[in-house]
Image (spheres, rainbow, N blue to C red):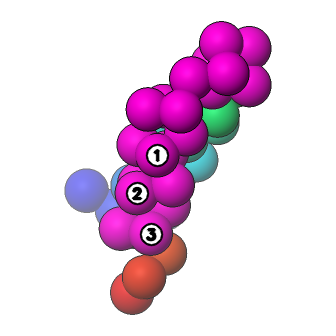
Amino acid sequence: MKMNEKYNDCIEEVSYLLFNAIIQRETNLKKKSMNLIEIYFHY
């Protein structure tokens, strides 16, 4: 898998989670999306 594809998938997934988190005000989704961001952008 190319790095670019992985990056795009991450952005898509995070965007989706954040979008849902805003609508539902769901703290679990916010935490999950923040964890994803940390995992992908830590390196």
Q: 1 above or below 21? A: below
Q: Amino acid at mark 2?
A: Asn
Quarter holding the C terminus is bottom left
Return the residue nearer the eye: 41 or 20: 20
Return the residue nearer the eye: 37 or 3: 37
Q: 32 above or below 38? A: above
- CB within 8 Å, label 2 to label 3: yes
Report x, y in % for residue 30.
Answer: 55, 39
From the image, tell me which residue sits under label 1: 31
Residue 7 can be seen, yes or no: no
Q: Going by the image, does 23 lie left or right of 42?
A: right
Q: Going by the image, does 41 lie left or right of 16?
A: left
Q: Amino acid at mark 1?
A: Lys
Q: Amino acid at mark 3?
A: Glu
SS for dot 2: helix
Residue 18 lies in quadrant: top right
From the image, tell me which residue sits under label 3: 38
Majority secondary structure of magenta residues? helix
Which dot, 3 or 1, sits closer to the camera?
1
Report x, y in % for residue 13.
Answer: 49, 35
Classed neighbour count for the residue bearing mark 2: other residues with Cα under 10 Å, few (<14), some (14–19), many (≥20): few
SS for dot 3: helix
Q: How many marks?
A: 3
Part of the protein shown in magenta: 20-40
From the image, tell me which residue sits under label 2: 35
Give the mark nearer the N terminus: 3 vs 1. Answer: 1
Q: Going by the image, does 19 lie left or right of 8?
A: right
Q: Residue at x 49, y 75 (%)?
A: 41
